[in-house]
Image (cartoon, grey):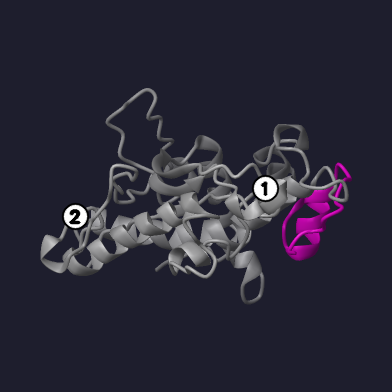
Amino acid sequence: MFVPATASSPTALSDFFSALIPALSAADLATLETLYPPPSTYPPPPTASHGAQFRRLAQAYGHYGYIAPLLHSAHFASKKKSAGDAGAAPVWVYEYAAHADLAAANHGDHVPAATHDTNILTPHKTPGLLAVSDAMHAHWSSFATTSDPNAVDTSHGNPGPTSNDASWPPFISPFGDTAADDYIPRPADDPTETRGKILVFGEGNDELMGRLGQRRRGTVARVRTLTEAEVRQFRFWWDRVGLSEGMGVVEEDGSKL
């Protein structure tokens, strides 16, 4: 919907973003090309009519338009909490990763799970997504009644997270005030690492893909850490957010909350 489905030219990424954000410099576009790997590293195009560059453009636009702005807000709120701001609240971040018609989570796909829509989610057709929705609502109702998304509030009849679920860690931003201050979390090297953790719902589930899927239930929820590539990709968009606002220029004092 948001990127050209037939994109196949080697310059498709630069062509698309130079048209979308005319203020991007040649150096910006060259950096962008290095931040998003070549099409060969992505899954095959979802259909024969999709171009080889489609998934690359879709990921980059998804970061630019949705994920990077969301994490920007989470970053600022997390920093306020880390700094001891008495009025600051903890932040929790989640990713919805169930597959849909394009073998990836599309914008808005999370709505049936987030709203527990039993007109769409049923024990027979979508048992995995129903479990995802149950887990979401266990966390959210727990937070609403106890201020902790992982608590079991028996006084309100809240079942809390289940054995199929995962404990949801607060988001502790790995980002600094500038790119030079960013931290790359490496949980494989340090199992006690707490920065950059988010909860992923529905990874590997393809129940809404119909005949194109394999009726895989996937994983209800798991914790993952932002990757080095993601830290660098999101930083790229944060540092250029002004190019998509107002007069299309970057302010010297950067973005604030």
Disc 2 marks a residue whose amino acid type is Ala
Residue 8 vs 22, above or below: the answer is above
**Viewer-side residue, 104 vs 127:** 127
- Point out the image quarter for the C terminus: bottom left
Which numbered dot is residue 103? Answer: 1
Residue 139, image x, y percentages: 30, 58
Region in magenta = 1-28
The residue at 67%/53% (across/down) is: 210
Residue 28 vs 114, above or below: the answer is above
Q: Secondary structure at mark 2?
A: loop
Which numbered dot is residue 151? Answer: 2
The residue at 44%/69% (across/down) is: 115
Residue 99, image x, y percentages: 60, 50
Q: Secondary structure at mark 1?
A: loop
Picture quadrant where residue 182 is located:
top left
Residue 90 among those drawn in magenta: no
- Would you call the spot at circle 1 few (<14 residues within 10 Å), some (14-19), or many (20 or more)? many
Mark earlier in primary sequence (1, 2): 1
Disc 1 marks a residue whose amino acid type is Ala
Q: Are marks 1 and 2 in contact (CB under 8 Å)?
A: no
Residue 79, image x, y percentages: 31, 56
Residue 183 visible (yes or no):
yes
Residue 6 among those drawn in magenta: yes
